[in-house]
Each structure stands twice: as structure tokens, then as C-alpha cells.
Image (cartoon, rainbow, N blue to C red):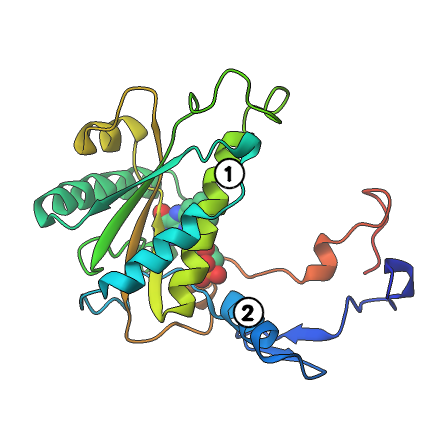
């Protein structure tokens, strides 16, 4: 067993993930473990590479069951999944997203706006399926075990379901793209979501030609990923070893 004080400066373990997201273990790992980490590091947010090919029903079932197996505060499972294949609905949503994109672009400096102009932010019509993931804060309420002091714990649970879906889809060879350029009221109305239930994400899901090795935002010079060492603190926030 290793504890954090055994770690040398700038070294956080026995694995590396280089700038292009290729994960390598310095020591051989049992097959399943190796594959798990490879999937985690291969996962990408997809906008451009959707092929529009069908998703096998059993594959979709496995992916949704993975999402539904996520941990949730007080075992509330506060998520629902609206599967949207209707192209008219998707087109209406895409038009709304384009409007939100324009609003965001208006807030940027000239240099940022120029960079943003070259970045796609959605694959709503190119993907095979849209999956709107919702949060129902009333599920299991009022006695939600573990949410009395942190109201957001319900939302965290939904995000974990989304991450499970994302990783399972990646393992199945599918791509997922999270779209958040929308107004919740608009999407709730479009999909006829029950009052009080919040649409947390629109996920574009489907077969892809490839998964990029590098996040799109990094490839377009928008932002770079930061090294793990910068995110690690030891015992106190102020104690970092960089
Ligand atoms: C909460 C959330 C909202 C996001 N919204 C969008 C979005 O609206 N459009 C988009 O293109 N990507 C969106 N993304 C994807 C991120 O840009 C992406 O995860 C990040 O750039 C890192 O790239 P990677 O997921 O390929 O590692 C979102 C991701 C999260 C977690």
C-alpha cells in the first residue's frame, strides 16, 4: 500500500496519460482493469464524428442500464431519460441551441469570438439519438437521506448517471456529446417534461467514425487540460507539491 507521503515531488502514481489522451500503465494490469482505464481515457465529447448509423437495441439497453446503475443520494434515482429520435423535435432544439450559441458569442472578445466561430458545440442532427436527462427533486422527498444540507446532491446524482452512460457508450464504441447551450424552460416545454423536473443535459449519442485523441476545445486552442498535480492538495488547500 502506498500513501500520499510516499509520493515523490511531481509524481502521483504509476500511470501516465500523455497530451493526446493515450493512457499507459507502467506495470501490466489484469485485463479488465486495463480496459476500464483505457475506456475512461478514450472517452471524448463528440460533435463532428457522428455517422448517424443505427444503435443496436441491446447496446442501447446496456448503456441505459449502466446509467441507471449510478449511485444516487438517498437512493432517489432522480433521473429520467427522454430518448429523442424525432428529427423535427431535434431540429427545433438545434435551432434553439444555435440561438444560444449566438448569444454566448456576443459576450466574447473579438479574439475569443474568432476562435469560438471555428468550434462546433453540438451534433444534434448528426447523432443517431438525443437523450435528454432530467432531474426530479421531488423523488423520494422530503426525507432524502443525505440531501438535507446540500440541495445539489440530487443534481450530482444525475451527473453520475450521465457519466456512467458516457463511459458505457464509449466502451460500446459509441460517441456522446453533451449539449448545454439551451434554456431549461425551452427544452422542458419542447419535450413536455413534467413541471418541476429539470432537463440537466441533452446528450447526442450514436456510432462515430472515430474518437478524437484530444478534446476539441484543446485542438482549437480554446483551453488546455491541466496536469493532475495542479489539482492535488495535501491535508490543506495551501499545501501543493508542484
Ligand atoms: C456539464 C457539461 C456541459 C457541456 N456542454 C457542452 C456543450 O454545450 N457543447 C459542447 O460542445 N460540449 C459541451 N461539453 C463538453 C466539454 O466541452 C468537454 O467535456 C471538454 O471540453 C473536455 O473534452 P472531452 O470531454 O472530450 O474530454 C460539456 C461538458 C459538460 C461536463
Q: Residue at x 24, y 42 (%)?
A: 97
Q: Which mark is residue 157?
A: 1
Residue that extends furthest to the right in the rendered view of this protein: 5
Q: Is the CB atom of the residue marked by disc 1 within 8 angstroms of ligand 1's nearest atom? A: no
Image x and y of residue 83, in percent: 23, 46
Image x and y of residue 192, in percent: 19, 28
**Residue 10 vertical placement versus 95 (above, below):** below
Residue 112 appears in the figure: no
In the image, 51 versus 163, the foreground residue is 163
Q: Residue at x 55, y 23 (%)?
A: 144
Q: Which mark is residue 115?
A: none
In the image, 91 versus 82, the foreground residue is 82
Q: Check disc 2: other Cα within 10 Å, few if <14, some if 14-19, many if 20+.
A: some
The first of marks 1 and 2 along the sequence is: 2
Horizontally, residue 209 falls left or right of residue 54, namely: right
In the rendered image, the quadrant that contains the N terminus is: bottom right
Image x and y of residue 188, in percent: 25, 29
Q: Residue at x 40, y 72 (%)?
A: 212
Residue that extends furthest to the left in the rendered view of this protein: 88
- Quarter assignment of residue 99: top left
**Residue 209 vertical placement versus 127 (above, below):** below
In the rendered image, the quadrant that contains the C terminus is: bottom right
Q: Secondary structure at mark 2?
A: helix
Horizontally, residue 217 falls left or right of residue 52, namely: right
Name the residue beneath numbered marker 2.
Answer: 36
Horizontally, residue 112 falls left or right of residue 237, namely: left
Amino acid at each position: 500500500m502506498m500513501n500520499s507521503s510516499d509520493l515523490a515531488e511531481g509524481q502521483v502514481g504509476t500511470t501516465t496519460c500523455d497530451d493526446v489522451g493515450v493512457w499507459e500503465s507502467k506495470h501490466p494490469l489484469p485485463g479488465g482493469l486495463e480496459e476500464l482505464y483505457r475506456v475512461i481515457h478514450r472517452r471524448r465529447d463528440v460533435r463532428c464524428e457522428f455517422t448517424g448509423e443505427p444503435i443496436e437495441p441491446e447496446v442501447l439497453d446496456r448503456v441505459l442500464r449502466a446509467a441507471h446503475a449510478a449511485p444516487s443520494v438517498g437512493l432517489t434515482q432522480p433521473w429520467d431519460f427522454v430518448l429523442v429520435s424525432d428529427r423535427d423535435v431535434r431540429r427545433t432544439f438545434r435551432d434553439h441551441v444555435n440561438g444560444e450559441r449566438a448569444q454566448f458569442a456576443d459576450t466574447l472578445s473579438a479574439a475569443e469570438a474568432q476562435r469560438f466561430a471555428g468550434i462546433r458545440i453540438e451534433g444534434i442532427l448528426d447523432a443517431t439519438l438525443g437523450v435528454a436527462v432530467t432531474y426530479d427533486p421531488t423523488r423520494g422527498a422530503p426525507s432524502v437521506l443525505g440531501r438535507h444540507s446540500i440541495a445539489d446532491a440530487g443534481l450530482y446524482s444525475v451527473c453520475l448517471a450521465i457519466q456512467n452512460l458516457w463511459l458505457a457508450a464509449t466502451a460500446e464504441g459509441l460517441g456522446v456529446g453533451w449539449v448545454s447551450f439551451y434554456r431549461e424552460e425551452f427544452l422542458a416545454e419542447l419535450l413536455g417534461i413534467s413541471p418541476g423536473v429539470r432537463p440537466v443535459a441533452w446528450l447526442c449519442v450514436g456510432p462515430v467514425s472515430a474518437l478524437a485523441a484530444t478534446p476539441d476545445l484543446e485542438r482549437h486552442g480554446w483551453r488546455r487540460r491541466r496536469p493532475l498535480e495542479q489539482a492535488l492538495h495535501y491535508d490543506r488547500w495551501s499545501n501543493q507539491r508542484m
